[in-house]
Image (cartoon, rainbow, N blue to C red):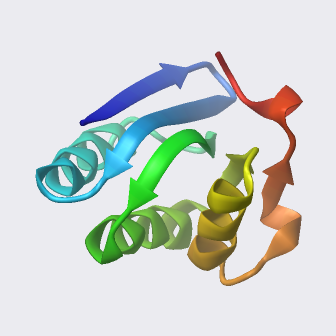
Amino acid sequence: MLRIIIHETDAEMAIRLEGRIAGPWVAELDHAWEEAAHRLASRKVSLDLCNVTYADVSGKRVLKDIYAQTRARLVANTPMTQFLAEEVTGSNADRTEHGGSKCTQ
């Protein structure tokens, strides 16, 4: 199961993901992103990966696509989510925030 929460302000679109980015949930994330991307305009994007428990190859591809289109700021708080963020950004550490305090609840 994957929960996708999108919070929009004038300055930012924050996307929080919870659960597994795998199987049929990859298509759900891709669809949610396609709809959200139309509303993006000049806002910055953040991807909160703190509550992601797994991402398969297809899930990582969608995250990489979102990152390639937006240069989103990724937020991670565990070794697994930090590794995922580094895979998505190509180890671009300046685009990844580590630490639980940055994660949304």
The residue drawn where x is 76% and y is 44% is 77
From this view, report whether residue 15 is shown above or below residue 66. Answer: above
Q: Residue furthest bottom?
A: 90
Q: Position of residue 71 (x, y in %)?
A: 64, 64
Q: Nearer the viewer, residue 53 or 74?
A: 53
> Would you say 24 lies left or right of 12 here?
left
Q: Position of residue 9 (x, y in %)?
A: 61, 19
The residue drawn where x is 36% and y is 74% is 61
The residue drawn where x is 15% and y is 54% is 27
Location of the N terminus by quadrant is top left
Q: Residue furthest left?
A: 24
Q: Nearer the viewer, residue 64 or 83?
A: 83
From this view, report whether residue 98 is shown above or below residue 36. Answer: below
> Would you say 15 lies left or right of 26 here?
right
Q: Which of the 4 quarters of the picture holds residue 67?
A: bottom right
> Would you say 104 lies left or right of 25 here?
right
Q: Position of residue 68 (x, y in %)?
A: 52, 73
Q: Position of residue 105 (x, y in %)?
A: 64, 16
From this view, report whether residue 90 is shown above or below residue 96. Answer: below
The residue drawn where x is 74% and y is 59% is 79
Q: Which of the 4 quarters of the picture holds residue 94?
A: bottom right
Q: Which of the 4 quarters of the picture holds residue 30?
A: bottom left
